[in-house]
Amino acid sequence: MGSGSTRPNNADDKMIAAIERGDDGQFKDRNPGKNADTKLIKEKAAREKKIQDKTDRLKALRLAAEQEAKAK
């Protein structure tokens, strides 16, 4: 046998080899390309901020209810 020179060594070769073996659903690139879609990134950040604000408001309500319960 050779030194393994026919072994796939980059993501494209690995994907093609995985498809040929029939397990293309299991192939995952270790270094996926960066997402440069700034609109998507901004939407995600806005969603996260909205969720964090909601969480903060619920936490404040819970603390106020606990303090009111202690006062009684």
Image: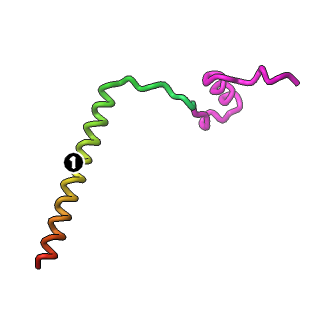
Q: Is residue 70 above or below residue 32?
A: below
Comparing 22 with 62, the one in front is 62
Q: Position of residue 17 (x, y in %)?
A: 69, 26
- Mark 1 residue type: Asp
Image-quadrant location for residue 13: top right
Q: Position of residue 56 (x, y in %)?
A: 22, 53
10 Å neighbourhood of mark 1: few (<14), some, or many (≥20)?
few
Residue for point 79% across, 24% down: 4
Is 42 included in the stretch rendered in magenta?
no
Residue matched to label 1? 53
Q: Is residue 63 above or below residue 5?
A: below
Comparing 58 with 26, the one in front is 58
Comparing 72 with 41, the one in front is 72
Q: Is residue 37 left or right of residue 71?
A: right
Q: Quadrant of the C terminus?
A: bottom left
Q: Position of residue 5 (x, y in %)?
A: 78, 20
Is 16 included in the stretch rendered in magenta?
yes
Residue for point 70% across, 24% down: 8
Q: Is residue 59 left or right of residue 22?
A: left
Which residue sits furthest right?
1
The magenta span reads 1-28
Image-quadrant location for residue 12: top right
Under tag 1, what secondary structure?
A: helix
Residue for point 88% across, 25% down: 1
Residue for point 27% across, 40% down: 47
